[in-house]
Image: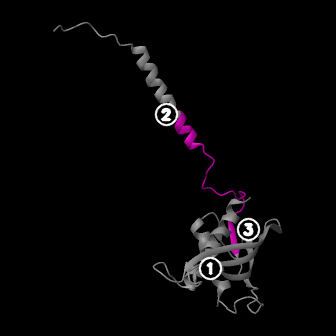
């Protein structure tokens, strides 16, 4: 058995090149990740800081033919409060009185619908979908004009009537209101 005690031939230039290449690759990866187009910042114009949310007008025709004859008490107040709470949570706009606000959100409740989604084998309804539809107008008090309108903006939720996931229609209405408020705030702060 012979032991070879010759010095090894290490190419220090190649090791340095590999190390430098790894650093460049790592820095390039960080730059690409950091420069993605996603941001949590608002796209609001710089001068827009405050908003007033008017009480929604309830224009739902509960007596219309083909609709459930169901009135939801204080739905317009609940929608307004949910929208205000969502603006507070979002933090891009502060809530203000109408005479001091940069923007004024005006809305009307247009419809409340419940449609069946799934049925059991016996044709009993298993799951429903709730839709709350509103029309919106965003008034820019600084410019004295309407910035945008939406004629059929919808918040929705689903609920099961039986089984382990069963909940009440009232709970689903609250979820639909929350969904509607989230969509309204996103429309306001992101779509300029």
For residue 85, which quarter of the picture? Answer: bottom right
Q: Position of residue 93 (x, y in %)?
A: 65, 66
Q: As rendered, which of 131 and 165 lies closer to the eye? A: 165
Q: Secondary structure at mark 1?
A: helix
| Residue for badge 2 | 26
The label nearer to you, 3 versus 2, is 2
Compute the Cα span from label 2 to label 1.
48 Å
What residue lies at 39% left-to-right and 15% top-to-bottom? 12
Outermost residue, left direction?
A: 1
The answer to whether 40 is drawn above or below residue 123 in the figure is above
Look at the numbered discs 2 and 1 and tell me whether their residues touch, using CB distance below 8 Å: no
- Residue 111 is marked as none
In the image, the segment drawn in magenta is 28-52
Q: As rendered, which of 31 and 104 lies closer to the eye? A: 31
The overriding secondary structure of the stretch rendered in magenta is: loop
Q: Position of residue 126 (x, y in %)?
A: 56, 81
The label nearer to you, 2 versus 1, is 2
Q: Secondary structure at mark 2?
A: helix
| Residue for badge 1 | 81
| Residue for badge 3 | 102
Q: Earlier in the sequence, mark 3 or mark 2?
A: 2
Outermost residue, front direction?
A: 121
Taking 147 as reference, is 80 left or right? left
């Amino acid at each position: 058995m012979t032991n070879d005690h010759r010095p090894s031939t290490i190419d220090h230039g190649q090791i340095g090149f590999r190390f430098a290449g790894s650093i460049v690759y790592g820095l390039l990866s960080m730059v690409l990740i950091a420069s993605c187009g996603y941001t949590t910042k608002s796209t609001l114009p710089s001068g827009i800081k405050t908003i007033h949310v008017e009480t929604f007008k309830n224009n739902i025709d509960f007596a219309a033919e083909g609709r459930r004859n169901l009135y939801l008490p204080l739905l317009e107040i609940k929608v307004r409060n949910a929208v205000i709470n969502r603006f507070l949570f979002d933090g891009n706009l502060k809530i203000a009185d109408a005479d001091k606000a940069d923007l004024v959100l005006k809305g009307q409740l247009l419809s409340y619908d419940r449609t069946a989604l799934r049925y059991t084998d016996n044709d009993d309804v298993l799951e429903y979908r709730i839709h709350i539809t509103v029309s919106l107008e965003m008034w820019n008090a600084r410019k004295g004009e309407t910035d945008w309108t939406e004629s059929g903006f919808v918040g929705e939720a689903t609920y099961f009537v039986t089984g382990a996931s069963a909940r009440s229609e009232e709970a689903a209405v609250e979820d639909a209101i929350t969904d509607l408020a989230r969509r309204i705030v996103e429309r306001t702060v992101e779509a300029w």
